Amino acid sequence: MAALKLRLPASPVENSLEGRAFVFSGFCVAVLAIVLYGQDYVVPAAGVAATAIGHVVSYLGRARKRSMLGQALLASLVFAGLAYFLADSVLALFGGVLPQANFAIALVAVTSFDLKTRRNCYSSLWISLAILYLAAVYAWDYPFGILVGLWAVCLAGFWVASHLRRMGARLSAPPAALAAVVLGTLAVGLAGFVLIPQPTSLAPSPVVVSLPNFVSFKGELENPALPLVQLSGDPSGATSTIDLHYRGRLGDSPVMYVRTGAPAYWRGLVFDTYQGGVWTTSKRGFLEMQPYIPPRLLPPAPPNNLGTFVQVFRVLRPLPGVINAAYPIQSLYAPVTSLREDSYGTFFTPDLLQPGQTYSVVSYLPNLTANELKNEPAANAAQFIDPIYLDDGALSQQARSLALTAVGGHTATEFDEVMALTNYLQTNFRYSQQLGHVPAGRDPVDWFLFDVKIGYCEQFATAETLMLRSLGIPARLATGYSTGTYDPVLDQSVVREHDAHAWVEVWFPSHGWVPVDPSPGFSALAATQFPSHWAAGGIARLIPHLEIGAPLGAIGSLGLVAVIPVAVAIAVLVVFAWAWLRTRRRRGRGGTKAGPCESELLRLYERVQRKLGRRRAPPETPLEYLSGASPGPVLGVLEQVTDAVNEGAYAGRWPDPNVVRGLADRLS
Amino acid sequence: MSPTPRLVGALALAAVIEYYGASSEVPWLFLLASWIAALCAVSLIFALWNRAGLRLHLSVRGASAAPGSPAGDLPTHLMRNAPLPEPIFEGDALSMEIGLDTTGAARGPARLVGFIGSQEISAATGLVPRSGWRQGVELRGLRRGPVDARAWVLESSDFAGLFRSRRANPDAEVALVLPRVTSLAARPQARELEASVAAPRAGSGTEMFGVREYRPGDSLRRIHWRSSARHGELVVREYEPPGIQTLGIFCDPGPANSEVADQVARLAASEAWDCIRNGGRVMLWGPGLTASEPGEARSLWAALEWLARYPTRAAGGQDADPPRVTEAVAVTGGAHPEVVEALEMVRRRGGMVRAWVVGDAGRAQGAIEKFMDLDGPVEHVGTEWPL
C-alpha cells in the first residue's frame, strides 16, 4: 500500500514572507471589524496573538514534512473549536457572543500553525472574509467601508506577492503606477458600487448571525421601553393593551438598527377591541414554534407580490420580546429557544430582547399600489372577516356622522372610502406629541375629533379604525415602529424611541391586511416599496434638493438598463485617459532633440519591418538589418528609409515631412 | 493579452460576494465585490499600458579570458583592430547584460525568458525604472561559433497577475566565439618539418632588408649578434621575401564531429596566424564552403571569423574552385577527394603542400597514406588542445 502523502505540492507563494504578511493583515482587519462592530474582545485578541505565533511557526517550518502527530493535534484543536461553537451557540456556555465569528477566529488561529501551501493561505483569507462578512452585518456606519477597503488591499497584496514570487521577482513595483492602480481601483469600484443597480436574490433566507437568548417562556417582566404599551401582562414584556388616556415619553435614543432591503413599518402588536379608550386583543391563543420558522409554516405568499427582502434587526436597548418586522413574513430566525405566534401573526420571544441581540426576517413585498387596490373586486369585505373587526365600540353618533361626511362622494370602491377618510384626517387635524390629558369621563376619540383636533398617532389611528368600522370596513390598530432614519446607500435604518408608531390595518379581501397611516406627515398608503437598489439613487434621495437627484433617480428606475449609460460613460472616460496618455508619451519622446517628423519616419520604419515580416533585433543596426533583408519590392523603400533613419539618428538631420509621406506612399 | 486562471478566480469571488450581498442585503458586500471587479478592469488597462512600453535589452558587457586564451598572447596592435568590444575565444567567459527598457515612466512587473547559446536564462522584476532595468549574465566555457540569443520572450502583466502578455522577440546573434589560436612554429615537430621541407617563407630571400626579433625555428646562422648584443635579446637578419606567400588552408567540409571541427578550426587558425604575422596572405577554402574573401586575406580577424562559423555558416555558398596559392595546407579529418585534388593542383603548380590529419589514429590512417602520396609532410593530431 502506498504511503500516505501528508505533504502537499509546494507553491512559490508559501515561501513569500510578504504573501504571508498580507494573509495575516487581512485576518487582522477582519478581527478589528469584529472588535469594533461586534463588541467582541477576548477571543479576537487571543486569536490575533495565536495567529501571529502560528504564522511564524509555519513559516519557519514550511519546508518540514507534516507529521502525523501534528496533524492529529491540529485536527483535535479544530474539533475543540467546533465543540466550543456548538456549546456557545446552542447552550451559551461562554456567553454566546458571536459564536460564529469566534469559531472562525479560532479556526484561523489553529490552521495558521500549518500554513504550508498556497491553498492553506487562501483558506485563511477566505475565513477572514467570512469574519468580515459577519462584522458587515453589524456595521451601521460609513467608516466600515475603510475596513472593507483595507481587506481588499490585503487580498490584492497577497495576489501581488504571489504573482511576483511565481515570476521569481522581488516584491517591488513602480510607485506612481502602483498608486494609480490602487486609487483607480478604489475610485472605479466606488463608482461601480454607486452607479450599478444592486441585485436582489430571488430566494433569500434569514441571516443567521445571532447573540442567543436561551430563556424559556416563564415569569413576568415589565415593559421597559415601548411607551405605547403601558401595562405588563405577558412573559415577554409585551402587553396586550393600549390606553389612550396615557402617553409615555419618547426620546431620541436609538432602540434598534435595521438592515433592510426596503424601508418599511416594523409592525409589532395588533389590537382589535376598543372599549372606553383602551385597546385590547380578543384572541389570546398562541402557537409555540422553533426559532427558525421556514416559509412552509407561515401563510402562503400574497398573490401578485413583488418579491421578498431581508431584514436584520440589532437591538440596542432592552425591548419587549416582540418581533417587530415588515409583514407579511416569509421566514424568520431569532436566536432563542422557541418562538410564539399569536392569533394576529405577531411573533414573541420568551424573554426581553437584550442589547446586542439580533434576529433576521424575510418578508414579502405585497403589491399594494393604489391602482392595485382600486381594482379590488367589489364585494362586501365584512362577509370574509371576523365581526370583531367591525365593532366600532363606543363610537359616538357624531363621529359616525363625521365618517360619512368625510367619505361623501368617494364611495365607489373600498379603497376610495379608506383614502377619503385618511386624507380627511390628515388634512383637518394636526399632529402633535404635546398633548394634554383627556378629561375624565370624555371619550378620547371624541375629545380628539371634536374638542382639541390635535393628536398623535394613536389618536389618529384609533379614530380612523373606528370610523372605518362604522362604515362597514374591517380595520384594526397596528403598533410598532415607523421606518426610522433610513440610509438608502447602506440599506439600513436607525430606529429611535420617537419612531414608535401606531397605524391602521384595513382588510381588503384580495390583499389581506393593508397598512394605512392617517397621521399627518406620513404617507397615507403605508405600503412598503422597494428602493431602487442603486446606491446613486440612494445618494440622490439623501440630497433631495440636489438637481442631479432627479436624473439619477430616473436612471435608477431603469433597472438593469441603467448599466448602459454607465458603461458608456466609463468607456468615454477610458478613451479620454488613453488619448491623454498617448499624447503625453509622444511629447515625452519628442523633447528638444526631436526633429519635425522623427516620429513619422520611425513609424514608417516600423511599418517597413512589419511588411518584411521580421523586426529588427535590439543589437542589430539599421544597416545590418538592411543587409539581412531579403530582396523584394519593399527593399528599395527600406534602403531609403534606412538612410533617412541613420541620417536622422546620427547626424540629427531628419527628413522633410514630404519626403516621409512620399516614402509612405511608395510603401503603400 | 490573455487572462490568467486567477482572473477567473477573482471574478468568481466577486460573483459569490455579490450573491451573498443580494441574499443578505448587506451593501458592504456589494462594495467589496465592486472593488474586486474594479481591480480586474484596472488591471487590464494597466497590463496593456505595461506591455506597450517595455522593450527587451540584450548587450555584451565584456569578456574575460580563460587560462590559456590567446587574447593575452596576441600583439597589442592586432588587438586594437579586434572586433568590439573585445575578441572572445573558445573557453573564455562572456559577460552579457539582459534587461528591459521603458518608454516614459517606470513600469513592471515583467519577466524575460530565453536562450543565449545553449543556456536558458530567466529573470524577472517587479520594477523597471525609467532608466531601465539590467541584470548581468555570465556565460563560462564558451564553445566556438556564434552565440545566439534565441526564443526570447518578454512576459509582462499587471501587479496581481490577472492578465498576462507574452511577446516573442526575434532571434539575434550577440557574439561570435573565435577558435583558439597559437603559433605552431613553436612546436618542435613543426620546426623539424619546416627544416626538412625548407618551404619558402617570408624573410628567406637573399637581399637583407632588416632585422627582427628571434622566433623559435629561425636558423642560428641568421642571428645578428651585434644587434642582439645591443637589444639584449636575440635578433635575426630579415631577408626580403622572394614574393608574397599565399597560403591556402583547405578545410574538411564534413568533419566527423564537433570536436574534430573545433580542432580543424584551431589548426587552421594557427596556420593562418603564423602566415599572416610573417606577412603572408591566407585563403580559406573547403569543398562546398564559401571561400574567404581575397580582400581580407591579410586579416587574422576575418580568418578567425570564417573559422568561427566553420563549417555551418561557411557552407551554403557557391561551390568555388580552390584558390590559386603558392602553398597549401590541408586540415582535415579524412582524405576528402576534392581536398586531395586541390593539394595535387597546388603541387603541380610548384607549390608546397602539407597536411594535418585530425582524429583518432584508426580513422586517420587512410587519409595519412593518401596525403603521404603527395610527397608532403603529414602530421596527425588528436582533438586535444593545446597540441
Image (cartoon, rainbow, N blue to C red):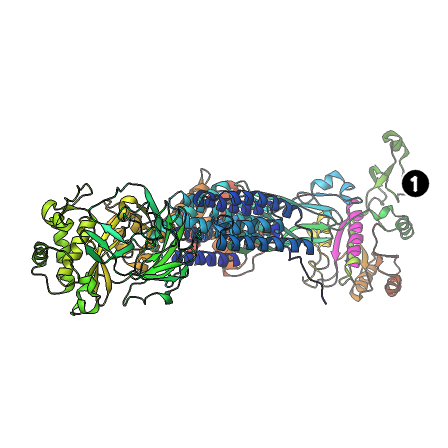
Instruction: Please name whichever residue, B192 or A166, is drawn nearer the observer in this view of the structure.
Output: A166
Q: On the picture, is B226 further left or further right than A67?
A: right
Amino acid under disc 1: Arg
Q: Position of residue A220 (x, y in %)?
A: 36, 50
Q: On the picture, is B176 further left or further right than A573?
A: right
Instruction: Please name whichever residue, B74 or A424, is drawn nearer the observer in this view of the structure.
Output: A424
Secondary element under disc 1, as helix, strand or loop, is helix
Q: On the picture, is B117 further left or further right than A532?
A: right
The residue that disc 1 covers is B221
Q: Position of residue B163 (x, y in %)?
A: 50, 55
Confirm whether the magenta stretch covers residue B277: yes
Label 1: chain letter: B
Q: Is residue B139 visible?
A: yes
Question: Which residue appears at 88% of the width and 45% of the height?
Answer: B217
Instruction: Please name whichever residue, A657 or A588, is drawn nearer the observer in this view of the structure.
Output: A588
- Magenta-drawn stretch, dominant element (helix, strand or loop): helix
In the image, the segment drawn in magenta is B260-287
